[in-house]
Amino acid sequence: MSLEDVPDYLSTIAGISELTAQLILSTVIICLFLFPYLILAKDNPSPLVSVILIFLAEAVTLGLGWSPFWIMIMLMVLTASALAMLGAKAVTGTGG
């Protein structure tokens, strides 16, 4: 069994769809990347480092074939909209 077959194997064992298995495995990989950093930087974790680690973990899952490509696109759209809101807040000086 190769690494690309793990989502199919998980979906067969658990009786779930392959997409659900891919999302579960992607979440596990993201947690493996993110949780050690959050534990080590428990006093003051940087949101920028967290976002970089999430993108890195998503790139790994895309490379393994465990994650659908649209998840990365959604992650990029959410990050871009969050940065746009922060920029608009900085320019206008409003709280919301």
Image (spheres, helix red, strand yellow):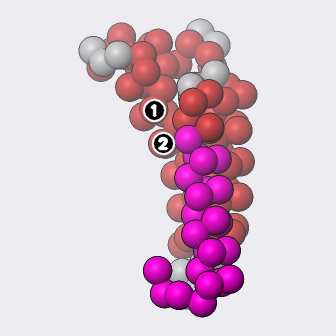
Q: Which residues are magenta?
A: 74-96
Give, as a three-letter code, the residue at label 2: Thr
Q: In screen coordinates, is 57 left or right of 39? A: right
Q: In screen coordinates, is 72 left or right of 95? A: right
Residue appearing at x 48%, y 26% in the figure: 22
Q: Which residue is mark 1?
A: 23
Give, as a three-letter code, the residue at label 1: Leu
Residue appearing at x 30%, y 18% in the figure: 16
Residue 78 x, y percent position in the rendering: 56, 52
- Local secondary structure at mark 1: helix
- Give the spatial CA distance, label 2 vs label 1: 6 Å
| Numbered tag placed on residue 27 in the rendering | 2
Q: In screen coordinates, is 25 left or right of 90? A: left
The front one of 70 and 30 is 70
Residue appearing at x 60%, y 47% in the figure: 77
Q: In screen coordinates, is 1 left or right of 56? A: left
Res 32 seen here: no
- Residue lying at the far front in this picture: please name it: 92
